[in-house]
Image: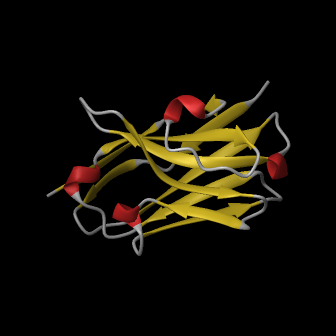
Amino acid sequence: EVQLVESGGGSVQAGGSLRLSCAVSGLTFDDYTIGWFRQAPGKGREGVSGISRSGGGLYYAEFVKGRFTISSDNAKNTVYLQMNSLKPEETAIYYCAAVSGEHWYTGANLWDYWGQGTQVTVSS
């Protein structure tokens, strides 16, 4: 059974930092791209960042470049998202997802597996 389990969400003030973790099990880590998406209330799910093939391929949405860093610990089958300089408009549920191969897909419907999400709240 494939499982993606997010952790690390919480509440911070604007300008603060959080580190999200996504623990992956039930699939061959190197064969998948792991991505982070977020969904704010009343909005669609948008892609934030992705990593594939042991960190060889990286993707960042324009609105997080320079502030967020994605990384992976292959020994632990875990992907991390370090989020710095957080803004109130980035309050959302953050999800990790997995898709076979070395691809980044903007469309959330193209991803194979999803975690349950972790809440990030940024106050002004």
Question: Could you tell me which residue is drawn at 14 percent across and 58 percent down?
Answer: 124
Q: Point out residue 29 in the picture as x, y percentages from the top left corner.
A: 81, 48
Write down the quadrant of residue 111 in the picture. Answer: top right
Could you say where residue 117 lies in the image, as x and y percent from the top left?
A: 48, 35
**Is residue 115 something one can see in this rendering?**
no
In the image, 111 versus 18, the foreground residue is 111
Looking at the image, is 65 positioned above or below residue 106? Answer: below
Tell me if 37 is positioned left or right of 56 in this view.
Answer: left
Farthest residue, direction bottom:
66
Q: Is residue 124 above or below residue 67?
A: above
| 32 left or right of 50 in image | right
Image color mode: secondary structure
> Going 69% across and 39% down the picture, which residue do you hit?
99
Query: Residue 17, position in %: x, y?
Result: 37, 66
Q: Residue furthest left?
A: 124
Q: Look at the picture and state if 101 lies above or below 26.
A: below
The quadrant where residue 83 appears: bottom left
Q: Left of 9 or right of it: where is 26?
A: right
In the image, what residue occupies the spot 22% across and 63% down? 14
Quarter of the picture holding the N terminus: top right
Relative image position of residue 84 (x, y in whole percent): 38, 69
| Residue 46 visible, this angle | yes
Residue nearer the viewer, 67 or 46: 46
Pick whichever, 100 or 91, lies toward us.
100
Give the image quarter of residue 97.
top right
User: What residue sits 50% from the left and 44% below the top?
Assistant: 106
In the rendered picture of this protein, how many numbered marks are placed on residues?
0
Query: Which residue lies most toward the top here?
Result: 1
